[in-house]
Image (cartoon, grey):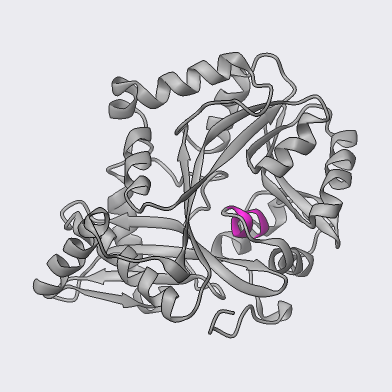
Amino acid sequence: MCARSGPPPVDQRLPSYWATRHLSENGCAAISLADRTRALQSWGNFSLAYSVAYQPKLEYFGDANGFLAYGRRGGYTFVLGDPLCSEEDKADLLRRFLAKFWSPSFVQISESTARCLGAQGFKINEIGIDTWLELSGYSFAGKDKEWLRYADNWITKRGYRIEEGTIADREAEVLNVSERWRRTRTISRKEVRFLNRPIPMTDEPDVRRFFCVSPAGRLEAFVFFDPLYEDGRLTGYVTCIKRRIPESSTYAEAAIMKRAIETFQRENVSRLWLGLSPLANIEDRIFRPSRGLHWVGRYLHRAAWFNRLCYNFQGHTHYKKRFRGNEVKMYYASRSPNNTLRILTLCSLCGAF
């Protein structure tokens, strides 16, 4: 069991800054914050669980026994991640949702959810891999992890500090790093959302924040980790937000990750999830896929022009593979025979345009 005290009582958990601003837009009157928190603490053991429970502007379907989160755009409905419920209740919750929404799409779901939907006539496509580290036996020894040791040594010898802290201590600096980082992205006008949880500018229970600080005391990079739970216990974390100023060392993020992993290991945390590597290792051998999506996904992952100008799929894949973790397939499910317009609409929902 983790050495930390675990999740706080429900009535102590407050919505994030973003959720507070947009609470009236969430459309979640039937699923209270307390119900979402209880579901998260019981079944929130997958990468998107914290985002499913607390991301602003999501809508919810379900009851006190579990729920799923979704967003709507352009007449389409997109479900985010797995339902937050027990495995025994999953099929019934999905059946009830499909009775209300005939043709939704499900994005970044696990194999167990994909199997339930496949039985309902959905086509299931792989959309990438999620990587996780079993921390109890994870080691930085060997040539494969030399890059992490080197980054840590480089940062230390030059007087940089890796510190765990809070938003309250560094709010203005976090905003500065975040805005300068965002200006270097292809999508720079606004925060990417839905598949990514927008950066919360307030401290949240059990969310961990690690900072890289220069010898002069300037914040140069940070990595935030959302908590994961199972049966009321905090069991792991997922890397959710990583940002740095353009002129900072490329070793800063790797050094933060090494120190965070060591911290979690001392606390007996079970797992660290690194998040989705979009479109990586698409094979589509288990389920009946949409063939068009299959070939488009494989092409975009390897297309040099798309990786250079639009989104660096290969960079994400290479970075996470270097940790030598465990990989699981993630899926997209839809009943539609043609998903071109749906995928473009999903990109719009995520803030890509």
Question: Principal SS element in the magenta part?
Answer: helix
Highlighted range, magenta:
48-53
Horizontal placement of 110 versus 279: left or right? right
Q: Residue furthest left?
A: 158
Residue 204 sits above or below residue 178 on the image: below
Pinpoint residue 337: horizontal percent, then vertical percent.
70, 14
Magenta residue check for 50:
yes
Task: Out of 252 and 243, give the one closest to the viewer.
Answer: 252
182 sits to left or right of 19 = left
Depth check, front residue: 32 or 323: 323
Q: Inspect this view and state whether residue 63 appears.
A: yes
Does the magenta run of residues contain 49? Answer: yes
The image quadrant where one finds the N terminus is bottom right
Q: Position of residue 100 (x, y in %)?
A: 88, 36
The location of residue 277, given as percent across then percent down, is 45, 41
Q: Is residue 80 above or below residue 50?
A: above
Residue found at x 41% / y 70%? 209
Taking the image as shown, residue 114 lies to the left or right of residue 300, namely right
* Residue 119: image location, x then y, percent: 82, 30
Q: Residue at x 30, y 77 (%)?
A: 163
> Which quadrant of the view contains residue 21?
bottom right
For the point 59% across and 85% down, the residue is 5
Residue drawn at x 79%, y 66% as measured from the top left? 35
